[in-house]
Amino acid sequence: MPVAGPPDLQEKIAQFDRAIFLYENVAAYKLFGYAVATANVLLQAALLARAWSLPTGPAAHLAAILTAYLAADLVNGLVHMYMDNNDDYVSPAGPLIAGFHLHHKLPRYTDRPLPEVYFLESGSKVWLAPCLAAGLFFSLRPEANPFAVYALAYFGVLSSVAEVSHYLAHNSLSPAAAALARAGLLLSKRRHGRHHTEDNVSYTFLNGFTDPVVDLIARKLYSGYKNGTDLHYVNYKAAGRR
């Protein structure tokens, strides 16, 4: 049955329906996610091993962690912003884009052990694998700066930790998770709740420190998802949680 609305909205809904059908029924998309997750985790391990083989002092090591924390929160937030507002369902990546939008339709995850969340959610980070591969190549050069290698290694790991942080913000009632959020190490439920109750805000999801920067960029680039991509999954019927 056609959905009422402007012709362009009806077309976007139809495009989403086709894309999500492919995402859920063509095994290659799930296999692709597993392949990306495997690549990301292996590259993270290799880059960490390389970083830990390089000499650095405690102060530089701590500075690298702090730099990576801010960079991971910012970069992953910017990618989230881009994807939330991306409606190119007819591109080769269209099914993956449609699948990404289900995190608004189905905000609660399937309950899983945290290592499983770390691995599976790393499969959505297609952009991270080439970044880590380039970082590993850079780290093997004789002139590689140890601080940069440490920061890149921790950035890679924290980009996946951000997915665990996001999962905990949605699913967990753990006092430990709440304490880590209060300490600023993970994302708080209150901060992330704005992303789902308001519009075009709070895209970051490691600890939310760079939200003001990403929110400013979002206001410049996008009008929001509530009256955009969130309307495209109106026909979607979910059998369960993601």
Image: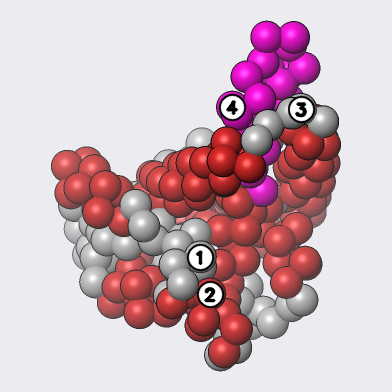
Picture residue at 62% right of the left edge, 58% below the top: 161
Q: Secondary structure at mark 2?
A: helix
> Where does the magenta region start and end?
132-157
Precedes in sequence: disc 4 or disc 1? 4
Task: Tell me the residue that label 3 is attached to.
Answer: 54
Hey, what amino acid is under mark 2?
A: Leu
Precedes in sequence: disc 4 or disc 2? 4
In the rendered view, does 23 fall on the left or right side of 191? Answer: right
Hey, what amino acid is under mark 3?
A: Leu
Magenta part, dominant SS: helix
Precedes in sequence: disc 4 or disc 3? 3
Label annotation for residue 221: none
Picture residue at 25% right of the left edge, 54% below the top: 212
Question: Separation of disc 4 and disc 1 at Cα?
Answer: 22 Å
Label annotation for residue 185: 1
Give the mark count: 4
Question: Separation of disc 4 and disc 2 at Cα?
Answer: 26 Å
Precedes in sequence: disc 3 or disc 2? 3
Image location of residue 208, percent across then percent down = 39, 61
Image location of residue 230, percent across then percent down = 35, 65
Quarter of image, res 203: bottom left
Question: Separation of disc 3 and disc 1 at Cα?
Answer: 26 Å
Q: Secondary structure at mark 4?
A: helix
Label annotation for residue 148: 4
- Is 155 part of what is drawn in magenta? yes
Q: Secondary structure at mark 1?
A: loop
Hey, what amino acid is under mark 1?
A: Leu
User: In this rendering, does residue 152 appear at all?
Assistant: no
